[in-house]
Image (cartoon, rainbow, N blue to C red):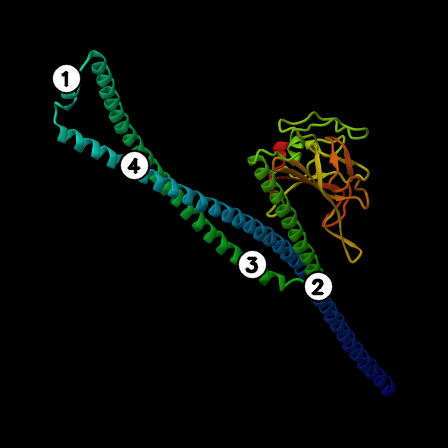
Amino acid sequence: MRKLGLKIVGVVVIVIILSQSSVAIAATKSELNNSNTVTEKKINEAKENLNEIQTEKSETLKQVEQLTGQISEYETQIRQLNEEIEGLNDKIEQEEENLKKAEEDYTKQEELLQARLVATYEAGETSYLDFILSSASITELISNYYLITEVATSDTELLEKIQEQKKEIETAKRNLENSKKELDNSKASKQQISSQLQTSKKEKDSQVLKLNQEEKQTQADLEQFEADKREIQAELRAIAQQEKENSNNGNNNTNNNHGNNTGGNTTGGNTNTAPSANGFVFPVSGLSKANIRNKNYPSYAGHTGVDVNINVSGKTIVAAKGGTVQRSKAYIKNGKYYSYGECIVINHGGGVATLYAHGSPGSRRVTVGQTVQQGQPIMTVGTTGNSSGEHLHFEVLINGNPVNPLPYLP
């Protein structure tokens, strides 16, 4: 009996120990589950943070690119305002000279009129009549009458001339005043844009510091792209100025003939479109405006052209209008395409030029100085340089300044 009691006690003890172990195991399992949940939550938070960081970097780069475009746009506006200010200064200088000359002429004519009035007053009211009556013969009478008539006519013309000169002086003064107001407005605009430019530059510098190494390289490529753009624009402005001077000298540059050249399409250059009102054909054979990616211009700050969204290799780029090849260049540095990539610029004369960029490697078919006809194949569509996907970047420049290409295309 005693042994049985001991066995019962032993069983009870074992049950108690096992039950406590089960509780301990259950507690441990619950803790593990809780710990696992916390860990998963931390992992998810980390992933979210990582995505946010990557998104932030991407957005930062986009913001830097946007600021770079704004800076380029501000610099273009400042350059145009400088040219405007220079032109207004020249205009004011010319108007001041015209005003000075008009006032000098007016003073001389007024002095002459005063002298005539004094002479007439001193001679008395009967001087003309006395002069006629003193004639010795009918012939002399007629002659004296003719002289008096001429003097009277001359006096009348003198008065009219003086009145006209007064009007000219008043007009010259108004023009001068208006030109000075325009100059003040241009200077104020330049000051405002210069301030915006400095603000954008500071903001850009701040954002650039946040970029990683790869993004900084992308930004450096973008900076080079903007520099290349300015170089091309400056070159075209110089050409346009030279053409203007030649035209003013009566010696039109032969390139002006290209400005009116709608040329025949050559084999393989048929664009399947009739020229637009501006005499342009679509720059990619077989395509039309429906294939343009960005219908709004500019699609973003600093984007000075439109992109013909193709994404199919092998399409032929053609001259939108006849002209002379101004630039045919592959932008390559350290064995890598950058900027415009494979690029061609055609000067159509009269300050009008077109730019074609991102052609496929080695596909340029024309050289600098070569005359091309409208519709002539010049390159193949590609994605070289600062490009994402197969497309043509197309620009129209007037006197080196980029304008909206859409109205020029059929």
Q: How crowded is mark 1: few (under 14 residues within 10 Å), some or many (20 or more)?
A: some
> What whole-number distance in Å separates the C-alpha atoms at marks 2 and 3?
20 Å
Q: Residue 117, position in %: x, y?
A: 18, 31
Of callouts 2 and 3, the N-terminal one: 3
The circle drawn on residue 213 is: 2
What residue is shown with label 4? 106
Amino acid type, callout 1: Leu
Q: Earlier in the sequence, mark 2 or mark 4?
A: 4
> Compared with residue 17, is residue 167 higher up or lower down, i.e. above or below?
above
| Gap in angstroms between the C-alphas marked 3 and 4 | 54 Å
Q: Which amino acid does label 2 sit on?
A: Gln
Of discs 2 and 4, which sits in the foreground? Answer: 4
Foreground residue, 42 or 361? 361
Q: What element carries label 4?
A: helix
Asked whether 93 or 61 is in front, the reply is: 93
Question: Where in the figure is residue 130, as x and y percent of width and height?
Answer: 13, 21
Inspect the image, locate mark 3, and give the three-letter code of the amino acid beneath it: Lys
Of badges 3 and 4, nearer the viewer stands 4
Percent position (x, y) of residue 95?
39, 41
Q: Is mark 2 on a helix, strand or loop?
A: helix
The residue wearing badge 1 is: 133
Q: In this view, does 201 lie above or below 110?
A: below
Q: Where is residue 83 in the image (x, y as percent from the top left)?
A: 51, 46
- Label 2 neighbour load within 10 Å: few <14, some 14-19, many 20+: few
Counting residues from the start of the chain, the first of labels 4 and 1 encountered is 4
| Distance between mark 4 and mark 1 Cα atoms | 36 Å
Residue that label 3 marks: 201
